[in-house]
Image (spheres, grey):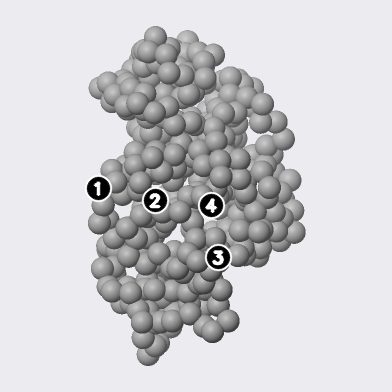
Amino acid sequence: MNPRTLLRLLATLLAFTLVAAACGDDSDTADAPSDDAPSDDAPSDDAPSDDADTGDDGCAAGETDGDLNLYNWAEYMDPELQAAFEAEFGVSVNEDNYDSNEAMQPIISAGNSGFDLIVPSDYMVSILIEAGDIAEIQTAAVPNLANLDPDFASGLPFDPDAKYSVPYQWGTTGLGVDLSVVGEDVPETWGLVFDPALREQYGIDGAITLLNDPRETMGAALKYLGYSLNSTSDAELDEAKVLVAEATGALAAYDSDQYDELLAAGNSAVAHGYSGNFIVQFDEADDPDQYAYFVPEEGGTRWVDNMAVVADAPHPCTAHTFINFLLDAENGAALTNWNYYASPNAASVEFIDPEVLEDPIVYPTDTSTLEFIADTGDFEINFTDAFIEAKG
């Protein structure tokens, strides 16, 4: 068994053990966990300790007011960290998953979702802020905000003053390839997806997956065409739509959840996806050297995923305590060491495994061709419509 696979299994067993211990506690501090859905339990009667700093915002540092209902991307949270949080604070973490920002957003915007904490990507943060769907961060409850790298503490385009979001992890979006199919000399270009001649040359028709995500996939086509992935030109978006539509017939699937596993299983040879997921999957393969990941030469997405408290969260204090827990230096490092995404936490650097810090896939040295996905306002619907039409 691959060592990393074994470590993951041990982490999961530990998680179950700690959850069982927490659930068996006679304390009244934790709500009963839900198996499938967010908890609707009322907040507990716990009061913050006498030395807790509540500030003027309401929640105290370390305060909990019920179980945490987390809505997150799949395979993005270290189960060992989750179990440690449950054991330390006597609450349960009920996690549900989504596969795109566009799948998450209407559920949160409809209200009464039952979720406390979500993990939206950059541009979606600004959309949620404008709609009033996420609450301001209660800074007194998150003293570990001081651990953030200055580049992430403020000034990000989607939340310049860092009032509504806290960076979680960051990475890139590109292509994972099976070198046993495409060869070592494969060109690092989006043309593998969008150029019929290249697809034929490398024998990959029917063996490609694209993310089931309008901004990422339309953005990839825009970058291949030499445009910004944040273009608000109808003409440029139409060109991209034609490319995606023509590529649809050459796809094995549109998939945002299992694309890395499909690649490793031989169900695809070229997969569009996120840097860290590929690293983990390749590391667990029988022959890691069989695979490679790159951001195509035309450029791609640099993204920041963020923690945000839902405006009508039933347990906002627990949400803030969880944010603070993940911003602890060692906990932040543990998250990066587990999922191979770069940490925005400067205090974590000394605890991150050297091979992770030195991996250019995790921490790219050249970001000149990368763009953040920006909120394009009313034009966002154009991306969604173009994507739906292109998929047919």
Q: Which residue is mark 2?
A: 134
Which of the two marks, 1 or 3, is nearer to us in this view? 3
Q: Is residue 23 visible?
A: no
Q: Which mark is residue 132?
A: none
Q: Secondary structure at mark 2?
A: loop
Compute the Cα span from label 4 to label 1.
23 Å
Q: Which mark is residue 140?
A: 3
Compute the Cα span from label 1 to label 3.
29 Å
Percent x, y of residue 173: 53, 34
Callouts 2 and 1 close, C-beta under 8 Å: no
Of the 4 image quadrants, the one containing the N terminus is bottom right
Q: Hey, what amino acid is under mark 2?
A: Ile
Q: Which residue is mark 1?
A: 110
Callouts 1 and 3 close, C-beta under 8 Å: no
- Tell me what residue is drawn at x 53 percent, y 52 percent: 166
- Mark 2 neighbour class, 10 Å CA radius: few under 14, some 14 to 19, many 20 or more: many
Compute the Cα span from label 4 to label 2.
12 Å
> Looking at the image, is mark 2 or mark 1 earlier in the sequence?
1
- Tell me what residue is drawn at x 52 percent, y 42 percent: 159
> Looking at the image, is mark 4 or mark 2 earlier in the sequence?
2
